[in-house]
Amino acid sequence: MRERETLFENTGRDDIILPFQIDPYGLRGRLVRLGPVVDGILGRHAYPEAVAVMLGETVALAACLAGSLKYDGVFTLQTKGDGPVGVLMADMTTDGAVRAYATYDVDRVAALDPADVSARSVPRLLGGGYIAFTVDQGSSTDRYQGIVELSGQSLSECTHAYFRQSEQIDAGVMIAAGRRDGGWRAGGIMVQRLPYARDLPGRPSEDEYDDLWRSAVALMSSTRAQELIASDLSPDQLLYRLFHEAGVRAYEAQPVTDTCRCSSDRVERVLVSLSDTDIDDLKVDGAVIVNCEFCKREWRYDDAALDALRSSAERPAF
């Protein structure tokens, strides 16, 4: 493993994706550790605890998956179901800017028994629906999307169902979220199997490689939720505990930031494209109020502001 200080010299040990490799196994992985980033996302929405925990897990899962892909754009993870929680959504840009939100039925969530552990499961919170993984690299590139039914007790299990259906991904993942030291924290770990290379010298047989893969997944599965979100256990120390006998190599940590991509320009482009009737339908107390679902920023446009927008849009550009 690299010198510990060089792993985090540009980041710190929170709000990171830490890439690693398990040398003899030929496996790659990502360890995600989120502190202030996920605390900011969950704190500004004041979600009920069950919703906050699952959204925190969604953010950690999105970071695990995004960190394992080669893309230049935005990776989005979204669930949609018919349960008390309607939507969970988190997306991450190539440079680590993450944002997330959830929609939920207040009464149906409040009716869940907080003492019942199963009330926080995917079937109880999300119900029936799907989980989608999308990579959008801009208008010049085809968008990739994978969708699978919500199948499992946890988001990790739902993701494994997608892995089993995909010919391109052979991976295991664990995620967790919860309160520690007065704030929200989240974390995750993912190991990904590389294609078997028959022509490399010293390579184990294919059967031995299968055994090595199963062993790595078993070691990963020994991780406890509290270790994934710990503030007093460094990410590299956790990797060493799990994989030191096999030999693990960590690389420089990548930063994750709480950054929304909303802007007044985007809002105003939408508003000027609407008809007068559409605008009137949107008005509340004589003004159009636009709220960003992700960061809760608010824009307010009264009649004078709307007239100014229309005049600006109609003015010819030179």
Image (spheres, helix red, strand yellow):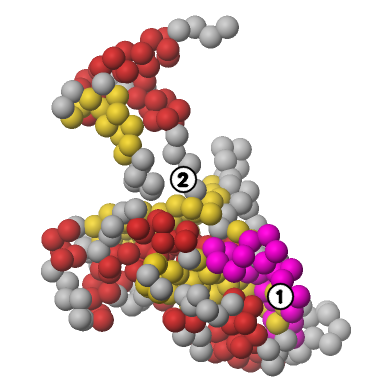
**On the image, numbered disc 1 is attached to which residue?**
4
Toward the viewer: 109 or 141? 109
Q: Residue 12: within the magenta?
A: yes
Toward the viewer: 202 or 178? 178
Question: What SS does tag 1 mark?
Answer: helix
Task: Judge from the rendering whether residue 173 lies leftward or rightward of residue 152; answer left or right.
Answer: right
- Residue 33: x and y, percent? 53, 69
Report the Cα–Cα distance between label 1 and label 2: 31 Å
Circle 1 Cα neighbour tier, 10 Å, few/some/many (<14 / 14–19 / ≥20): some
Circle 2 Cα neighbour tier, 10 Å, few/some/many (<14 / 14–19 / ≥20): some
Question: What SS does tag 2 mark?
Answer: loop
- Residue 108: x and y, percent? 15, 63
Please tell me which residue is depicted at 48% across the width and 42% down the height of the picture.
261
Mark 1 belongs to which amino acid? Arg
Residue 120 is tagged as none
Question: Is residue 275 visible to the viewer in this orientation of the structure?
Answer: yes
- From this view, report whether residue 263 is shown above or below residue 74: above
The quarter in which the C terminus is drawn is top right
**On the image, numbered disc 2 is attached to which residue?**
260
- Residue 76: x and y, percent? 47, 54
- The region drawn magenta spans 1-25
